[in-house]
Image (cartoon, helix red, strand yellow):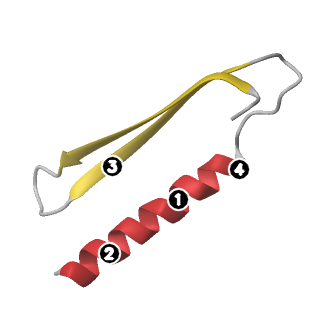
Amino acid sequence: MEEYKSFVATILVSPKSEDSGSVVHWTLEYEKLHDGIAHPETLLQLVQDISKDIVAHLIQAN
């Protein structure tokens, strides 16, 4: 996070209209300190892993 002026992660969860369950949308908004800093693609794998862990937890809880 030292390479970013700002970094905001937003999670929006909406119930499905025709079936049980929900749809989750992740939004990552960031501003790099300068153009030489790479885009944070590595965070996409982290978001995917967190999402899978949440699904597994919710399935186990039922």
* Apparent side of residue 28 relative to residue 58 in the rendered image (left or right): right
Q: Residue at x 37, y 43 (%)?
A: 25
Query: Which comes sooner in the sequence, label 2 or label 4?
Result: 4
Using a 10 Å C-alpha cutoff, classify the residue at mark 2 as few (fewer than 14 neighbours), some (14 to 19) or many (20 or more). Answer: few
Q: Residue at x 26, y 46 (%)?
A: 13
Q: In x, y percent, where is residue 24?
A: 33, 49
Using a 10 Å C-alpha cutoff, classify the residue at mark 1 as few (fewer than 14 neighbours), some (14 to 19) or many (20 or more). Answer: few
Q: In x, y percent, where is residue 56?
A: 36, 76
Q: Are marks 1 and 4 in contact (CB under 8 Å)?
A: no
Query: Which comes sooner in the sequence, label 3 or label 2?
Result: 3
> 41 and 30: which one is in front?
30
Please state which of the two labelled residues, at mark 2 or mark 1, is closer to the viewer: 2
Instruction: Read off the residue under disc 1.
Output: 48
Q: In x, y percent, where is residue 27?
A: 46, 35
Instruction: Read off the residue under disc 4.
Output: 42
Residue 35, compared with residue 19, is above or below; it is above
Q: Secondary structure at mark 2?
A: helix
Instruction: Read off the residue under disc 2.
Output: 57
* Apparent side of residue 14 relative to residue 30 in the rendered image (left or right): left
Query: Whole-Å distance between the Cαs marked 3 and 2?
Result: 15 Å
Residue type highlighted by circle 4: Thr
Query: Which comes sooner in the sequence, label 4 or label 3?
Result: 3
Q: Secondary structure at mark 3?
A: strand
